[in-house]
Image (cartoon, rainbow, N blue to C red):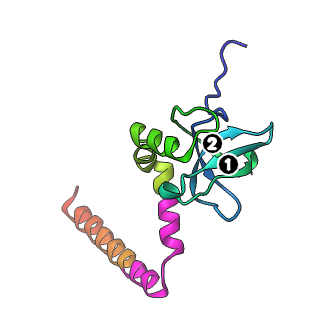
């Protein structure tokens, strides 16, 4: 086979999104590989709120971002590498991260927040409809 297209490998320093379990929705970094199905991940806690623990690879969604850290790196080393490479800020700029953030925001909305959103959508829709109608009358 002439060159593999897959680039998101499970390797130390790979940034991942936890998709299942108590830390679901949080970001973590792969620190060490235990075996074919399990890895050790760390947030670090001060950055993402994820403590160092073992996790099945199935519960992770790997991202394109990777920092250079040795296998089994300490929390301090990992934190320094993430800050040096600006990994968390690069992640925050991606559309994937923005979608995750929007989903969290909607989930945390109160009844009144949902009501305000509905009113704002109605207002925007009415304005758009009015604009289209006036443009049609003007012949544009």
Region rendered in magenta: 100-119
Q: Earlier in the sequence, mark 1 or mark 2?
A: 2
Q: Nearer the viewer, mark 1 or mark 2?
A: 2
Q: Foreground residue, 136 or 28?
A: 28
Q: Foreground residue, 92 or 87?
A: 87
Q: Quadrant of residue 38?
A: top right
Residue shown at the point (77%, 39%) measured from the top left: 34
Q: Is residue 99 visible?
A: no
Q: Secondary structure at mark 1?
A: strand
Give yes or no for residue 89 being in the magenta stretch. no
Q: Residues within 10 Å of mark 2 (few under 14, many from 20)?
A: many
Q: Is residue 124 shown left or right of residue 53?
A: left
* Extreme residue toward the left, this view: 138
Q: Position of residue 102 (x, y in %)?
A: 47, 63
Q: Position of residue 104 (x, y in %)?
A: 52, 67
Q: Secondary structure at mark 2?
A: strand
Q: Is residue 18 shown left or right of residue 48?
A: right
Identify residue for label 2.
30
Q: Quadrant of residue 122?
A: bottom left
Pointer 1 with pointer 2, Cβ within 8 A: yes
Give yes or no for residue 113 being in the magenta stretch. yes
Q: Foreground residue, 28 or 139?
A: 28
User: Gap in Å between the C-alphas at discs 1 and 2?
Assistant: 10 Å
* Extreme residue toward the bottom, this view: 112
Q: Position of residue 98 (x, y in %)?
A: 45, 55
Q: Is residue 132 shown left or right of residue 35?
A: left
Identify residue for label 1.
60
């Amino acid at each position: 086979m002439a060159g593999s297209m897959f680039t998101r490998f499970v390797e130390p320093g790979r940034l991942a999104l936890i998709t299942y379990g108590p830390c679901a929705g949080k970001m973590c970094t792969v620190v060490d590989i235990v075996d074919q199905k399990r890895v050790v991940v760390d947030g670090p806690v001060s950055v993402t709120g994820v403590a160092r623990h073992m996790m099945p690879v199935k519960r992770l969604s790997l991202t394109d971002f990777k920092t250079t850290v040795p296998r089994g790196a300490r929390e301090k080393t990992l934190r320094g590498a993430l800050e040096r490479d600006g990994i968390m800020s690069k992640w925050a700029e991606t559309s994937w991260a923005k979608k995750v953030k929007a989903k969290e925001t909607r989930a945390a909305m109160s009844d009144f927040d949902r009501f305000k959103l509905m009113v704002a959508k109605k207002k925007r829709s009415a304005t758009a409809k009015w604009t289209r109608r006036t443009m049609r009358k003007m012949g544009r």
